[in-house]
Image (spheres, rainbow, N blue to C red):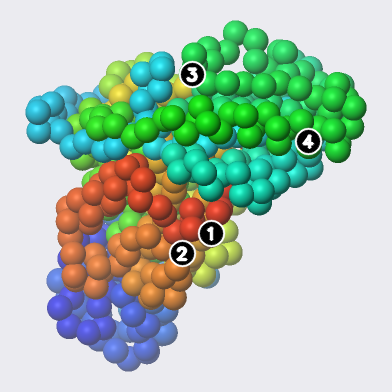
Amino acid sequence: MAATAEAPTVVHLHESDHVAIAGSDLAEGLEVRAGGQLISVREEVRRGHKIAVRSVAAGEPVRRYGQVIGFAAVDIRHGEHVHLHNLEYREFERHYEFAAEARAEDVVPEPRRTTFQGYVRSDGRVGTRNYLGVLTSVNCSATAAKRIAQQVRFSGALEDFDNVDGVVALTHGTGCGMAPDGEGIEVLRRVMRGYLTHPNFAGFLVLGLGCEDNQIVQLTRDVPLRADLPVVTTTIQELGGTAKTVREGVARLTEMLPEANKAGRSTVPVSELVLGTNCGGSDSYSGITANPGLGAAVDRLVAQGGTGIVGETPEIYGTEHMLVRRAESRAVGEKLLDKIAWWQDYTAKNGGSMDNNPSPGNKAGGLTTILEKSLGAVAKGGTTTLRDVVDYAAPVSSRGFVFMDTPGYDPVSVTGIVAGGANVVCFTTGRGSAFGCTPVPSLKLATNTPLYEHMREDMDVNCGGVVDGATTIDELGDEIFEHVVRVASGERTKSEEFDYGEEEFVPWHLGTVM
Protein backbone atom coordinates (compact mmCIF):
# COMPACT_ATOMS: atom_id res chain seq x y z
CA MET A 1 0.00 0.00 0.00
CA ALA A 2 1.35 3.41 -0.93
CA ALA A 3 0.04 6.68 0.49
CA THR A 4 1.22 10.22 0.02
CA ALA A 5 3.24 11.73 2.85
CA GLU A 6 1.64 15.11 2.28
CA ALA A 7 -1.87 16.19 3.24
CA PRO A 8 -4.42 15.46 2.04
CA THR A 9 -3.71 11.72 2.01
CA VAL A 10 -4.94 9.29 -0.61
CA VAL A 11 -4.38 5.52 -0.66
CA HIS A 12 -3.25 3.93 -3.91
CA LEU A 13 -3.14 0.17 -3.38
CA HIS A 14 -1.66 -1.29 -6.58
CA GLU A 15 0.36 0.10 -9.46
CA SER A 16 -2.29 -1.02 -11.95
CA ASP A 17 -5.16 0.67 -10.08
CA HIS A 18 -7.12 3.40 -11.83
CA VAL A 19 -8.39 4.82 -8.53
CA ALA A 20 -7.13 5.86 -5.11
CA ILE A 21 -9.10 6.29 -1.88
CA ALA A 22 -9.38 9.69 -0.24
CA GLY A 23 -8.09 9.68 3.33
CA SER A 24 -9.87 12.98 3.98
CA ASP A 25 -12.31 15.23 2.12
CA LEU A 26 -10.68 16.51 -1.07
CA ALA A 27 -11.75 19.94 -2.32
CA GLU A 28 -11.76 20.88 -5.98
CA GLY A 29 -8.40 22.29 -7.09
CA LEU A 30 -6.26 20.48 -4.50
CA GLU A 31 -3.31 18.44 -5.67
CA VAL A 32 -2.65 14.94 -4.34
CA ARG A 33 0.11 12.48 -5.11
CA ALA A 34 -0.94 8.99 -6.20
CA GLY A 35 0.38 6.45 -8.64
CA GLY A 36 3.71 8.28 -8.78
CA GLN A 37 2.24 11.55 -10.02
CA LEU A 38 0.50 14.69 -8.87
CA ILE A 39 -3.26 14.65 -9.52
CA SER A 40 -5.36 17.80 -9.59
CA VAL A 41 -8.74 17.21 -7.96
CA ARG A 42 -11.40 18.20 -10.52
CA GLU A 43 -14.40 17.97 -8.16
CA GLU A 44 -15.07 17.38 -4.48
CA VAL A 45 -14.28 13.84 -3.33
CA ARG A 46 -15.48 12.83 0.13
CA ARG A 47 -13.36 10.87 2.59
CA GLY A 48 -13.37 7.18 1.70
CA HIS A 49 -14.47 7.77 -1.89
CA LYS A 50 -12.51 7.09 -5.05
CA ILE A 51 -10.55 9.56 -7.17
CA ALA A 52 -9.32 8.62 -10.64
CA VAL A 53 -5.53 8.61 -10.83
CA ARG A 54 -5.57 7.97 -14.58
CA SER A 55 -8.14 8.45 -17.32
CA VAL A 56 -10.36 5.55 -18.38
CA ALA A 57 -12.36 5.37 -21.62
CA ALA A 58 -16.05 4.46 -21.53
CA GLY A 59 -16.51 0.68 -21.48
CA GLU A 60 -13.04 -0.05 -20.14
CA PRO A 61 -12.50 -1.93 -16.85
CA VAL A 62 -11.64 0.06 -13.74
CA ARG A 63 -9.25 -1.53 -11.24
CA ARG A 64 -8.72 -1.31 -7.50
CA TYR A 65 -6.63 -3.84 -5.51
CA GLY A 66 -5.20 -4.71 -8.93
CA GLN A 67 -8.57 -6.30 -9.76
CA VAL A 68 -11.65 -5.29 -11.77
CA ILE A 69 -14.25 -3.44 -9.67
CA GLY A 70 -16.49 -2.33 -12.55
CA PHE A 71 -16.49 -0.60 -15.93
CA ALA A 72 -16.43 3.05 -16.89
CA ALA A 73 -19.99 4.06 -17.79
CA VAL A 74 -18.64 7.22 -19.47
CA ASP A 75 -15.18 8.61 -20.12
CA ILE A 76 -13.50 9.22 -16.77
CA ARG A 77 -10.73 11.81 -16.50
CA HIS A 78 -7.95 11.66 -13.93
CA GLY A 79 -8.82 13.74 -10.90
CA GLU A 80 -12.56 13.00 -11.12
CA HIS A 81 -14.71 11.42 -8.45
CA VAL A 82 -15.42 7.78 -9.38
CA HIS A 83 -18.71 6.41 -8.07
CA LEU A 84 -22.27 5.52 -9.05
CA HIS A 85 -22.52 8.22 -11.74
CA ASN A 86 -19.64 6.94 -13.85
CA LEU A 87 -18.80 3.38 -12.72
CA GLU A 88 -21.10 0.45 -13.47
CA TYR A 89 -21.28 -3.26 -12.77
CA ARG A 90 -20.85 -5.73 -15.61
CA GLU A 91 -19.99 -9.38 -15.74
CA PHE A 92 -16.45 -10.21 -16.83
CA GLU A 93 -14.56 -13.38 -17.67
CA ARG A 94 -12.83 -15.11 -14.77
CA HIS A 95 -10.13 -17.75 -15.18
CA TYR A 96 -10.27 -20.60 -12.68
CA GLU A 97 -6.88 -22.10 -11.82
CA PHE A 98 -7.75 -24.65 -9.19
CA ALA A 99 -5.30 -25.06 -6.30
CA ALA A 100 -2.64 -23.00 -8.10
CA GLU A 101 -1.71 -21.22 -4.87
CA ALA A 102 -2.44 -24.00 -2.37
CA ARG A 103 0.49 -24.40 -0.01
CA ALA A 104 1.54 -25.93 3.24
CA GLU A 105 1.30 -23.27 5.91
CA ASP A 106 4.04 -22.42 8.35
CA VAL A 107 3.03 -24.16 11.56
CA VAL A 108 3.96 -22.94 15.00
CA PRO A 109 5.42 -25.85 17.00
CA GLU A 110 3.13 -26.95 19.83
CA PRO A 111 5.47 -25.92 22.68
CA ARG A 112 5.41 -22.34 21.34
CA ARG A 113 1.66 -22.11 20.73
CA THR A 114 -0.47 -19.52 22.47
CA THR A 115 -2.94 -20.74 25.09
CA PHE A 116 -6.22 -19.39 26.46
CA GLN A 117 -8.55 -20.16 29.33
CA GLY A 118 -11.53 -22.14 28.05
CA TYR A 119 -14.26 -24.53 29.17
CA VAL A 120 -13.32 -28.08 28.17
CA ARG A 121 -16.48 -30.10 27.55
CA SER A 122 -17.02 -33.86 27.80
CA ASP A 123 -16.79 -34.29 24.02
CA GLY A 124 -13.39 -32.55 23.94
CA ARG A 125 -14.61 -29.31 22.40
CA VAL A 126 -13.79 -26.04 24.14
CA GLY A 127 -16.15 -23.21 25.00
CA THR A 128 -15.34 -19.55 25.51
CA ARG A 129 -18.50 -18.83 27.53
CA ASN A 130 -20.81 -20.84 29.82
CA TYR A 131 -24.51 -20.19 29.15
CA LEU A 132 -27.86 -21.83 29.72
CA GLY A 133 -30.17 -21.64 26.70
CA VAL A 134 -33.89 -21.67 25.96
CA LEU A 135 -34.28 -22.83 22.36
CA THR A 136 -37.65 -22.64 20.60
CA SER A 137 -38.80 -25.07 17.96
CA VAL A 138 -41.37 -22.61 16.61
CA ASN A 139 -42.28 -18.93 16.75
CA CYS A 140 -45.36 -19.80 18.79
CA SER A 141 -43.22 -20.55 21.86
CA ALA A 142 -41.02 -17.44 21.52
CA THR A 143 -42.90 -15.26 24.03
CA ALA A 144 -42.84 -17.94 26.72
CA ALA A 145 -39.14 -18.61 26.08
CA LYS A 146 -38.24 -14.94 26.45
CA ARG A 147 -40.33 -14.68 29.62
CA ILE A 148 -38.52 -17.68 31.12
CA ALA A 149 -35.06 -16.26 30.38
CA GLN A 150 -36.02 -12.83 31.68
CA GLN A 151 -37.43 -14.19 34.94
CA VAL A 152 -34.29 -16.22 35.62
CA ARG A 153 -32.09 -13.21 34.88
CA PHE A 154 -34.13 -10.76 36.94
CA SER A 155 -34.77 -13.13 39.86
CA GLY A 156 -31.22 -12.72 41.13
CA ALA A 157 -30.65 -16.48 40.92
CA LEU A 158 -27.54 -15.99 38.75
CA GLU A 159 -25.79 -13.90 41.41
CA ASP A 160 -24.73 -17.00 43.33
CA PHE A 161 -23.20 -18.70 40.27
CA ASP A 162 -20.17 -16.78 39.08
CA ASN A 163 -19.20 -19.34 36.44
CA VAL A 164 -22.51 -19.03 34.57
CA ASP A 165 -22.48 -16.19 32.05
CA GLY A 166 -26.25 -15.99 31.76
CA VAL A 167 -29.43 -17.35 30.22
CA VAL A 168 -30.23 -16.66 26.57
CA ALA A 169 -33.54 -17.19 24.76
CA LEU A 170 -32.96 -18.30 21.15
CA THR A 171 -36.22 -17.53 19.36
CA HIS A 172 -37.07 -17.19 15.69
CA GLY A 173 -39.95 -16.49 13.31
CA THR A 174 -40.51 -19.87 11.72
CA GLY A 175 -40.91 -23.58 12.60
CA CYS A 176 -44.40 -23.97 11.14
CA GLY A 177 -46.32 -23.02 8.02
CA MET A 178 -43.62 -24.87 6.08
CA ALA A 179 -43.13 -28.26 4.48
CA PRO A 180 -42.46 -30.90 7.16
CA ASP A 181 -39.46 -32.08 5.16
CA GLY A 182 -37.17 -30.60 2.54
CA GLU A 183 -34.59 -27.83 2.42
CA GLY A 184 -36.38 -25.20 4.50
CA ILE A 185 -36.98 -27.22 7.63
CA GLU A 186 -33.64 -29.02 7.33
CA VAL A 187 -31.76 -25.71 7.37
CA LEU A 188 -33.68 -24.65 10.48
CA ARG A 189 -32.96 -27.94 12.21
CA ARG A 190 -29.29 -27.76 11.21
CA VAL A 191 -29.02 -24.37 12.92
CA MET A 192 -30.78 -25.61 16.05
CA ARG A 193 -28.66 -28.77 16.25
CA GLY A 194 -25.55 -26.63 15.87
CA TYR A 195 -26.56 -24.56 18.88
CA LEU A 196 -27.60 -27.62 20.91
CA THR A 197 -24.13 -29.09 20.46
CA HIS A 198 -22.22 -25.79 20.85
CA PRO A 199 -19.53 -25.84 23.56
CA ASN A 200 -20.58 -22.43 24.91
CA PHE A 201 -23.69 -24.00 26.48
CA ALA A 202 -23.93 -25.81 29.81
CA GLY A 203 -27.61 -26.76 29.57
CA PHE A 204 -30.79 -26.31 27.52
CA LEU A 205 -34.54 -26.05 27.71
CA VAL A 206 -36.01 -26.82 24.28
CA LEU A 207 -39.52 -25.39 24.10
CA GLY A 208 -42.23 -25.89 21.51
CA LEU A 209 -45.94 -25.21 21.22
CA GLY A 210 -46.75 -28.85 20.47
CA CYS A 211 -48.50 -28.97 17.11
CA GLU A 212 -45.84 -27.35 14.88
CA ASP A 213 -44.20 -28.79 11.77
CA ASN A 214 -40.78 -28.65 13.47
CA GLN A 215 -41.46 -31.33 16.06
CA ILE A 216 -38.93 -31.49 18.88
CA VAL A 217 -38.63 -35.27 18.66
CA GLN A 218 -37.47 -34.98 15.05
CA LEU A 219 -35.25 -32.00 15.83
CA THR A 220 -33.30 -33.86 18.51
CA ARG A 221 -33.30 -37.30 16.85
CA ASP A 222 -29.77 -38.69 16.35
CA VAL A 223 -28.19 -35.48 17.70
CA PRO A 224 -24.90 -36.32 19.48
CA LEU A 225 -25.60 -34.41 22.69
CA ARG A 226 -22.76 -34.15 25.21
CA ALA A 227 -22.79 -36.32 28.30
CA ASP A 228 -22.34 -33.20 30.46
CA LEU A 229 -25.20 -31.25 28.82
CA PRO A 230 -28.62 -31.48 30.49
CA VAL A 231 -31.42 -30.95 27.94
CA VAL A 232 -35.08 -30.66 28.92
CA THR A 233 -37.68 -30.81 26.13
CA THR A 234 -41.32 -29.82 26.53
CA THR A 235 -44.23 -27.92 24.96
CA ILE A 236 -46.73 -25.30 26.03
CA GLN A 237 -49.62 -27.59 25.16
CA GLU A 238 -48.14 -30.43 27.22
CA LEU A 239 -47.64 -28.22 30.26
CA GLY A 240 -51.08 -26.61 30.11
CA GLY A 241 -50.53 -23.05 28.92
CA THR A 242 -48.19 -20.11 29.06
CA ALA A 243 -48.19 -19.39 32.80
CA LYS A 244 -47.52 -23.01 33.73
CA THR A 245 -44.82 -23.20 31.04
CA VAL A 246 -43.02 -20.14 32.37
CA ARG A 247 -43.11 -21.45 35.95
CA GLU A 248 -41.86 -24.87 34.86
CA GLY A 249 -39.19 -23.42 32.59
CA VAL A 250 -37.81 -21.15 35.31
CA ALA A 251 -37.74 -24.09 37.73
CA ARG A 252 -35.91 -26.37 35.31
CA LEU A 253 -33.26 -23.79 34.44
CA THR A 254 -32.77 -22.89 38.09
CA GLU A 255 -32.16 -26.57 38.83
CA MET A 256 -29.39 -26.59 36.18
CA LEU A 257 -27.46 -23.67 37.69
CA PRO A 258 -25.46 -25.51 40.39
CA GLU A 259 -24.17 -28.10 37.93
CA ALA A 260 -23.47 -25.50 35.25
CA ASN A 261 -21.52 -23.48 37.80
CA LYS A 262 -19.14 -26.40 38.38
CA ALA A 263 -17.60 -25.77 34.96
CA GLY A 264 -14.34 -23.90 35.22
CA ARG A 265 -11.81 -22.50 32.81
CA SER A 266 -8.55 -24.34 32.19
CA THR A 267 -5.51 -23.72 30.01
CA VAL A 268 -5.97 -24.99 26.46
CA PRO A 269 -4.11 -24.41 23.16
CA VAL A 270 -5.35 -21.66 20.88
CA SER A 271 -5.86 -24.35 18.22
CA GLU A 272 -9.22 -24.95 19.95
CA LEU A 273 -10.47 -21.57 18.76
CA VAL A 274 -12.86 -21.42 15.81
CA LEU A 275 -12.96 -17.77 14.73
CA GLY A 276 -16.01 -16.66 12.77
CA THR A 277 -15.62 -13.51 10.66
CA ASN A 278 -18.23 -11.16 9.25
CA CYS A 279 -18.45 -7.62 7.91
CA GLY A 280 -21.44 -5.27 8.13
CA GLY A 281 -21.94 -1.62 7.35
CA SER A 282 -18.83 -1.82 5.17
CA ASP A 283 -17.13 1.18 3.64
CA SER A 284 -14.26 1.83 1.27
CA TYR A 285 -11.76 1.47 4.12
CA SER A 286 -12.95 -2.05 4.98
CA GLY A 287 -10.69 -3.64 2.40
CA ILE A 288 -7.72 -1.47 3.41
CA THR A 289 -7.72 -1.74 7.21
CA ALA A 290 -10.06 -3.97 9.24
CA ASN A 291 -10.60 -6.83 6.79
CA PRO A 292 -6.95 -7.43 5.86
CA GLY A 293 -6.01 -6.88 9.51
CA LEU A 294 -8.53 -9.55 10.51
CA GLY A 295 -7.19 -11.75 7.70
CA ALA A 296 -3.71 -11.41 9.21
CA ALA A 297 -5.14 -12.54 12.57
CA VAL A 298 -6.78 -15.52 10.85
CA ASP A 299 -3.39 -16.42 9.34
CA ARG A 300 -1.84 -16.37 12.82
CA LEU A 301 -4.61 -18.58 14.20
CA VAL A 302 -4.28 -21.06 11.33
CA ALA A 303 -0.52 -21.23 11.87
CA GLN A 304 -1.26 -22.33 15.44
CA GLY A 305 -3.65 -25.07 14.35
CA GLY A 306 -6.89 -23.11 14.73
CA THR A 307 -9.77 -22.43 12.36
CA GLY A 308 -11.06 -19.29 10.66
CA ILE A 309 -14.47 -19.16 8.94
CA VAL A 310 -15.51 -16.69 6.23
CA GLY A 311 -19.10 -16.61 4.97
CA GLU A 312 -21.40 -14.20 3.09
CA THR A 313 -21.33 -15.85 -0.35
CA PRO A 314 -22.98 -12.90 -2.16
CA GLU A 315 -20.19 -10.71 -0.77
CA ILE A 316 -17.30 -12.69 -2.23
CA TYR A 317 -18.95 -12.73 -5.67
CA GLY A 318 -16.43 -11.68 -8.29
CA THR A 319 -13.50 -12.95 -6.21
CA GLU A 320 -14.25 -16.67 -6.48
CA HIS A 321 -11.48 -17.06 -9.09
CA MET A 322 -9.03 -15.81 -6.45
CA LEU A 323 -10.31 -18.22 -3.81
CA VAL A 324 -10.25 -21.33 -6.01
CA ARG A 325 -6.55 -20.64 -6.64
CA ARG A 326 -6.10 -21.07 -2.87
CA ALA A 327 -8.30 -24.17 -2.66
CA GLU A 328 -6.70 -27.30 -1.24
CA SER A 329 -7.93 -29.27 -4.25
CA ARG A 330 -10.06 -28.96 -7.35
CA ALA A 331 -12.90 -30.63 -5.44
CA VAL A 332 -12.88 -27.86 -2.80
CA GLY A 333 -12.77 -25.19 -5.52
CA GLU A 334 -15.67 -26.79 -7.36
CA LYS A 335 -17.74 -26.75 -4.16
CA LEU A 336 -17.27 -22.99 -3.97
CA LEU A 337 -18.24 -22.50 -7.63
CA ASP A 338 -21.35 -24.62 -7.08
CA LYS A 339 -22.40 -22.22 -4.30
CA ILE A 340 -21.81 -19.22 -6.56
CA ALA A 341 -23.93 -20.83 -9.30
CA TRP A 342 -26.74 -21.48 -6.78
CA TRP A 343 -26.75 -17.80 -5.77
CA GLN A 344 -26.79 -16.63 -9.37
CA ASP A 345 -29.83 -18.82 -10.02
CA TYR A 346 -31.47 -17.81 -6.72
CA THR A 347 -31.18 -14.07 -7.39
CA ALA A 348 -32.32 -14.48 -11.01
CA LYS A 349 -35.44 -16.39 -9.92
CA ASN A 350 -36.30 -13.51 -7.60
CA GLY A 351 -35.74 -10.85 -10.26
CA GLY A 352 -32.53 -9.59 -8.66
CA SER A 353 -28.87 -9.22 -9.47
CA MET A 354 -25.72 -10.05 -7.55
CA ASP A 355 -24.96 -6.32 -7.75
CA ASN A 356 -28.04 -5.54 -5.65
CA ASN A 357 -25.93 -6.30 -2.59
CA PRO A 358 -24.16 -2.99 -1.78
CA SER A 359 -26.52 -1.17 0.59
CA PRO A 360 -27.18 2.59 0.65
CA GLY A 361 -24.80 2.81 3.59
CA ASN A 362 -22.09 0.91 1.72
CA LYS A 363 -22.44 3.34 -1.19
CA ALA A 364 -22.39 6.38 1.07
CA GLY A 365 -19.14 4.96 2.45
CA GLY A 366 -17.56 4.91 -1.00
CA LEU A 367 -18.32 1.40 -2.27
CA THR A 368 -19.85 1.31 -5.73
CA THR A 369 -20.28 -2.27 -6.99
CA ILE A 370 -20.48 -5.78 -5.53
CA LEU A 371 -17.13 -6.49 -7.21
CA GLU A 372 -15.46 -3.74 -5.20
CA LYS A 373 -17.20 -4.76 -1.98
CA SER A 374 -16.24 -8.41 -2.45
CA LEU A 375 -12.58 -7.64 -2.98
CA GLY A 376 -12.52 -5.98 0.43
CA ALA A 377 -14.67 -8.62 2.13
CA VAL A 378 -12.62 -11.60 0.98
CA ALA A 379 -9.56 -10.19 2.75
CA LYS A 380 -11.03 -11.42 6.07
CA GLY A 381 -9.89 -14.91 5.05
CA GLY A 382 -6.21 -14.04 5.10
CA THR A 383 -3.77 -15.75 2.76
CA THR A 384 -3.71 -19.43 3.71
CA THR A 385 -5.04 -22.45 1.82
CA LEU A 386 -8.82 -22.88 1.56
CA ARG A 387 -9.38 -26.22 3.28
CA ASP A 388 -13.12 -26.72 2.85
CA VAL A 389 -16.45 -25.23 1.72
CA VAL A 390 -19.45 -26.16 3.87
CA ASP A 391 -23.20 -25.68 3.75
CA TYR A 392 -24.97 -23.08 5.87
CA ALA A 393 -24.80 -24.01 9.58
CA ALA A 394 -23.04 -27.29 8.83
CA PRO A 395 -20.45 -28.46 11.38
CA VAL A 396 -16.98 -27.19 10.55
CA SER A 397 -14.62 -30.11 11.10
CA SER A 398 -11.60 -29.01 9.05
CA ARG A 399 -8.90 -26.92 10.65
CA GLY A 400 -7.50 -23.93 8.82
CA PHE A 401 -9.33 -21.49 6.56
CA VAL A 402 -12.90 -22.64 5.77
CA PHE A 403 -15.66 -21.00 3.74
CA MET A 404 -19.33 -21.34 4.77
CA ASP A 405 -22.19 -20.62 2.37
CA THR A 406 -24.26 -17.91 4.07
CA PRO A 407 -26.31 -14.91 2.96
CA GLY A 408 -24.76 -11.47 3.33
CA TYR A 409 -27.40 -10.37 5.85
CA ASP A 410 -25.39 -10.12 9.05
CA PRO A 411 -27.57 -11.83 11.70
CA VAL A 412 -28.44 -14.70 9.36
CA SER A 413 -24.81 -15.12 8.34
CA VAL A 414 -23.40 -15.14 11.87
CA THR A 415 -26.17 -17.43 13.14
CA GLY A 416 -25.01 -20.02 10.60
CA ILE A 417 -21.34 -19.51 11.44
CA VAL A 418 -21.98 -19.95 15.17
CA ALA A 419 -24.08 -23.05 14.47
CA GLY A 420 -21.09 -24.37 12.53
CA GLY A 421 -18.98 -24.16 15.67
CA ALA A 422 -17.43 -20.68 15.91
CA ASN A 423 -16.65 -19.88 19.55
CA VAL A 424 -15.42 -16.31 18.89
CA VAL A 425 -16.60 -13.84 16.22
CA CYS A 426 -14.90 -10.75 14.78
CA PHE A 427 -17.24 -8.29 13.05
CA THR A 428 -15.75 -5.48 10.94
CA THR A 429 -17.66 -2.28 10.20
CA GLY A 430 -16.99 1.02 8.52
CA ARG A 431 -20.33 2.76 8.87
CA GLY A 432 -20.98 1.58 12.41
CA SER A 433 -22.77 -1.57 13.51
CA ALA A 434 -24.47 -2.59 16.74
CA PHE A 435 -24.16 -6.36 16.82
CA GLY A 436 -23.68 -9.30 19.14
CA CYS A 437 -24.26 -13.04 18.89
CA THR A 438 -24.83 -14.56 22.33
CA PRO A 439 -23.63 -17.12 23.43
CA VAL A 440 -20.50 -16.31 21.44
CA PRO A 441 -18.51 -13.13 22.16
CA SER A 442 -18.26 -10.79 19.18
CA LEU A 443 -15.55 -8.16 18.78
CA LYS A 444 -16.39 -5.17 16.58
CA LEU A 445 -13.55 -3.79 14.49
CA ALA A 446 -13.86 -0.20 13.25
CA THR A 447 -12.32 0.40 9.83
CA ASN A 448 -11.52 4.06 10.44
CA THR A 449 -10.57 6.27 13.37
CA PRO A 450 -13.47 8.78 13.08
CA LEU A 451 -15.95 5.91 13.41
CA TYR A 452 -14.05 4.44 16.36
CA GLU A 453 -14.05 7.78 18.16
CA HIS A 454 -17.73 8.42 17.32
CA MET A 455 -18.90 4.96 18.49
CA ARG A 456 -16.18 4.16 21.02
CA GLU A 457 -18.65 2.49 23.41
CA ASP A 458 -19.58 -0.03 20.69
CA MET A 459 -16.20 -0.63 19.02
CA ASP A 460 -13.55 -3.00 20.44
CA VAL A 461 -10.65 -2.34 18.06
CA ASN A 462 -9.66 0.71 16.02
CA CYS A 463 -8.20 -0.42 12.68
CA GLY A 464 -7.97 3.12 11.30
CA GLY A 465 -4.31 3.42 12.25
CA VAL A 466 -3.41 1.68 8.99
CA VAL A 467 -4.62 4.71 7.01
CA ASP A 468 -3.54 7.17 9.70
CA GLY A 469 0.02 5.83 9.46
CA ALA A 470 0.08 4.67 13.08
CA THR A 471 0.27 0.93 12.40
CA THR A 472 0.79 -1.73 9.73
CA ILE A 473 -1.42 -4.64 8.67
CA ASP A 474 0.96 -7.08 10.38
CA GLU A 475 0.88 -5.11 13.62
CA LEU A 476 -2.90 -4.86 13.42
CA GLY A 477 -3.11 -8.62 12.86
CA ASP A 478 -1.12 -9.17 16.04
CA GLU A 479 -3.36 -6.77 17.96
CA ILE A 480 -6.57 -8.46 16.79
CA PHE A 481 -5.20 -11.95 17.45
CA GLU A 482 -4.15 -11.02 20.99
CA HIS A 483 -7.54 -9.39 21.64
CA VAL A 484 -9.34 -12.52 20.41
CA VAL A 485 -7.31 -14.65 22.82
CA ARG A 486 -8.14 -12.35 25.75
CA VAL A 487 -11.85 -12.41 24.88
CA ALA A 488 -11.80 -16.20 24.51
CA SER A 489 -10.37 -16.31 28.04
CA GLY A 490 -13.24 -14.27 29.46
CA GLU A 491 -12.64 -10.59 28.73
CA ARG A 492 -16.01 -9.06 27.87
CA THR A 493 -16.66 -7.36 24.55
CA LYS A 494 -18.58 -4.12 24.02
CA SER A 495 -21.57 -6.01 22.61
CA GLU A 496 -21.65 -8.21 25.72
CA GLU A 497 -21.71 -5.13 27.92
CA PHE A 498 -24.93 -4.13 26.13
CA ASP A 499 -26.35 -7.70 26.20
CA TYR A 500 -26.56 -7.91 22.42
CA GLY A 501 -27.23 -11.31 20.94
CA GLU A 502 -30.73 -12.67 21.56
CA GLU A 503 -32.46 -10.75 18.77
CA GLU A 504 -29.56 -11.48 16.43
CA PHE A 505 -30.32 -15.22 16.40
CA VAL A 506 -31.89 -15.41 12.91
CA PRO A 507 -31.80 -18.78 11.09
CA TRP A 508 -31.86 -18.54 7.28
CA HIS A 509 -35.42 -19.04 6.10
CA LEU A 510 -35.61 -20.97 2.85
CA GLY A 511 -38.66 -22.41 1.18
CA THR A 512 -42.34 -21.60 0.91
CA VAL A 513 -44.38 -20.09 3.75
CA MET A 514 -47.63 -22.05 3.67
| Distance Cα–Cα, label 2 vs label 4 | 35 Å
Furthest-bottom residue in this view: 29
Q: Which residue is mark 4?
A: 247
Percent x, y of residue 322:
32, 37
Q: Which residue is mark 3?
A: 228
Question: Which of disc 3 and disc 1 is earlier in sequence?
Answer: 3
Q: Which residue is mark 1?
A: 498
Q: Are marks 2 and 1 in contact (CB under 8 Å)?
A: yes
Say if 36 sits above or below 492 in the image. Answer: below
Q: Which residue is mark 2?
A: 458
- Give left or right: position of 238 versus 34: right
Percent x, y of residue 173:
75, 39
- Give left or right: position of 37 versus 166: left
Q: Are marks 2 and 4 in contact (CB under 8 Å)?
A: no
Question: Which of disc 4 and disc 3 is earlier in sequence?
Answer: 3
Q: What residue sits 20% from the left and 51% below the top?
A: 478
Q: What residue sits 68% from the left and 17% below the top?
A: 219
| Distance Cα–Cα, label 3 vs label 2 | 35 Å
**Mark 1 or 4, which is nearer the eye?**
4
Say if 42 sits above or below 321 in the image. Answer: below
